[in-house]
Image (cartoon, rainbow, N blue to C red):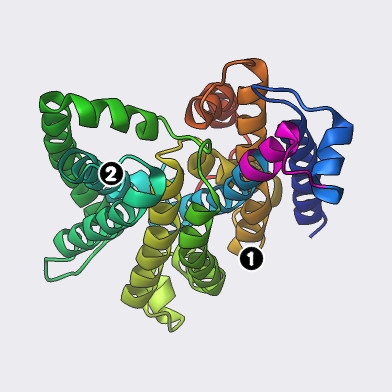
Amino acid sequence: MKRLQLVIFGSLALMIISIVVGLWFGSASVHPKEVIDAFVHFDAANNDHLIIRHSRVPRILLGVIVGVALGLAGAIMQALTRNPLADPGILGINAGTSAAVVIAIAYFGMTDAASYLWWAFAGAALAAVVVYTLGGSSRNGASPAKLALAGAALSMSIGALTSMVLVSNEFAFNQFRYWTVGTLQGRGLDVIVVVTPFIVAGVVLSLLLIRPLNAIALGEESARGLGANVPLIRVGCFVAVVLLSGAATAAAGPIAFIGLAAPHIVRLIVGPDNRKLIPGVLFLSPALLIMADSIGKTAAAPGELQTGIAAAVLGAPVFIALVRSKKVTAL
C-alpha cells in the first residue's frame, strides 16, 4: 500500500506541475498573473483570458479523461490476455474508428471533431463486436489468442479499405491526417460532454472487474475452480475496453504509449495485483498524457508538437528501458 501511495502522490505531483506548465506556456506564453485572473477576474475582452478559458482548460480536462481511458483500457487488455504487450488496438478498435472517421469526412463532409465523434465511436464499437463474433465462433468460444488474431485480421482488412478511400479522396486525406496523429488541440467542451459518460461507465466497469481479473491471472481452469464465470468476465472486459478506448480514440485520435506503458510502470512499482495496479494506472496515465502534451507544445513554441507525436517521442525511450529491465513483472 505504501508503494501504491507513492504512485498516487507522485502522479498527482506530476499532473499538477504539467497543468501549471500547460496553462502558462504554449504557442503564446501567458503571464502567471493573467492565468490567475482568467479564473478569478475573467475579462471577455482579454485575449489571454480567452486562451486560458476556452482553449487550455478544455485541453487539460480532455487530457485527464482520455489519459484515464487509455491507461485503464491497456491495463485490462494486459490482465485479460496475460500479455504485457497487449494494447486496445489489438481488438481492431483503432482501425474501426479510423474507417468511420474517413467515411464521415469523405462522404458526409464532416470536418470537426464534434461532428464525426459519434461516427468514430460507432466504428470502434462495430469493429469490437465483429472481432468478438469472429473470435468466439468456434465451439470452445472466445479466447485471448483468438480475439488477438481476429483483431489483427480485421485491422489489416479495414486498414486497406481506409487507405483506398484516402488515396482516392484528397479532401478526406487532408482532413484525416490531422485526426490520425492524435491531439488534444481544438477539442471543446462539447466533445468532453459527449465522451465523458462513456468513459465514466468504462471506469466503473473496470473497477468492478478488479477481483475477476485477479482470478483470471491464476489461469482459466483455476478461475473456474474458484467459481469465476470466465466468459462473462471476457465480455465485461471487452465492453470496458470498447467504452474506454473507443471514446478516447474518437475524441483525441489514436494516441500510443499511454495504454501500453502506464500499466508497465505501475506494475513495476506495485506488482501485478490488480487491486493496486488499476488504481495506480487511474492516476498515472492522465499525468503522463498531460505531461507529454505540455512538453510537446512548450518545446516547439511558437509551433506545436501534436500530443500523439510527443507521447511517442517521449515514451519510446522509457518503454524500451522498461522492456529491457530485469525487474519487469511477467504476466
Main secondary structure along the magenta-highlighted residues: helix
Tell me if residue 102 comes above or below residue 117 in the rendering.
above
Task: Say which quarter of the image contains residue 87.
Answer: top left
Q: Where is residue 67 shown, x and y percent of the image?
A: 57, 47
Q: Earlier in the sequence, mark 1 or mark 2?
A: 2
Residue at (89, 34) in percent of width and height: 33
Amino acid at the residue labelled 2: Met
Q: Which mark is residue 152?
A: none
Image quarter (top left, top right, bottom left or bottom right) of the N terminus: bottom right
Mark 2 residue element: loop
Mark 1 residue element: helix
Front residue (pair 4, 324): 4
Q: Which mark is residue 110?
A: 2
Amino acid at the residue labelled 1: Arg
Front residue (pair 297, 199): 297
Front residue (pair 130, 309): 309
Question: Is residue 93 inside the magenta stretch?
Answer: no
Residue at (22, 32) in percent of width and height: 172
Q: Dot 2, how many residues are within 10 Å of its Cα: few (below 14), some (14-19), or many (20+)?
A: some
Residue at (23, 65) in percent of width and height: 142
Q: Horizontally, is 22 left or right of 115 in the view?
A: right
Q: Where is residue 129 shown, x and y percent of the image?
A: 22, 63
Q: Disc 1 marks which residue?
A: 275
Q: Where is residue 219 shown, x and y percent of the image?
A: 41, 64
